[in-house]
Image: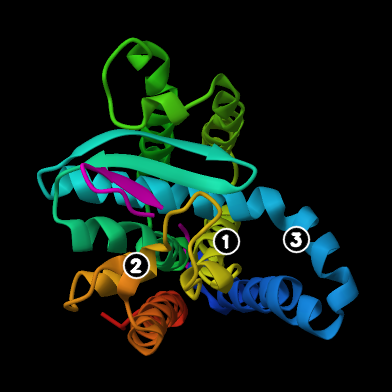
Amino acid sequence: MPVNDPSVYSHSTSSNHGLGHRRMLLSLMVGFFLLWVVLPLLFPNLAYLVYLLTAPLRYVGVFVHEMGHGLASLLTGGSFYWFQMDADGGVAITGGGWQSLVLLGGLLGPAVCGSVLLIVSTRAAKLWIPYLVLLLFFACGGYYMFKPVWLSTADYPLLAQWHMTHLLALLLPVLLMMACLFLLRAADAWQRLALQVLGIIMCYSAFSDTSYIFQYAALGNGMYSDARVFASLFLPFDVQALPWLAFVFFALLIGGLNFVLLGLGVKGALALPQPR
């Protein structure tokens, strides 16, 4: 959920390219799908327990979602002030930029990153490159989470809503950077497995909380979901007056795009190398 000022709206060897790693990828995808989607549907009484057990994994998706908003703002000429995470999710504070792309940066960002990681996990020969990119990404996220500490006396939008307790979430990027440094020295097979797990978590995070994408009513903080704000950009309605059917159309469109991105990532990861 980005908040944009002035308007406010709501993260090898040949054996390593072989069938074994593709089977592992399929097994991981099925396992995560059963855990995150099927199990809560079949056993509603366990849904909350599953949610608690998978919460740390879901926050990886929140991290990428908010970073997607901020980086999209920077890439389209806007500003990225900071972002924060808490028990209820996250929010990115941005200014300017191409608003539709800033929104899509969060709505599609996790699926884009996850799909790229899936493809890299089976097709890349030099894995130190993606791991260094991940290190830079997580370090950049940590910087923007810590940034409000030295902005506390400045006149920045919504700075009054930031609290020191949000710094507890810095534990996530720190642990992810430590994991990347450890994996840089690990065996090739473990490096590929970790990329697959991280890629699946990012891809599935777009679907693990579909209630957010399809949230038509105002959120608890009075804002609206990114999908509803995105829809209002293309229709002659304010976000508060957006018709329900129009919102559903755009929410389904965004959900469909996430499925397409996931499918492209899986297809690219499972495709056998072309003979030379």
Choose between 95 and 129: the one closer to the eye.
95
* First-in-chain label (1 vs 3): 3
The residue that mark 2 highlights is 240
**From the viewer's perspective, is the residue at label 1 or at label 3 nearer?**
3
State the extent of the magenta-drawn residues as a range: 1-14
Residue at 67% from the left image edge and 48% from the top image edge: 56
* First-in-chain label (3 vs 2): 3
The residue that mark 1 highlights is 201
Where does the image place residue 43, in percent across and percent down from the top left?
A: 87, 80
Q: Using the numbered discs, state the Cα–Cα distance from disc 1 to disc 3 in whole angstroms.
A: 14 Å
In the structure shown, which secondary structural element does the residue marked by tag 3 occupy? Answer: helix
Q: Is residue 2 visible?
A: yes
Quadrant hosting residue 34: bottom right
Q: Amino acid at mark 3?
A: Tyr
Where does the image place residue 67, in percent across and percent down from the top left?
A: 37, 45
**From the viewer's perspective, is the residue at label 1 or at label 2 nearer?**
2
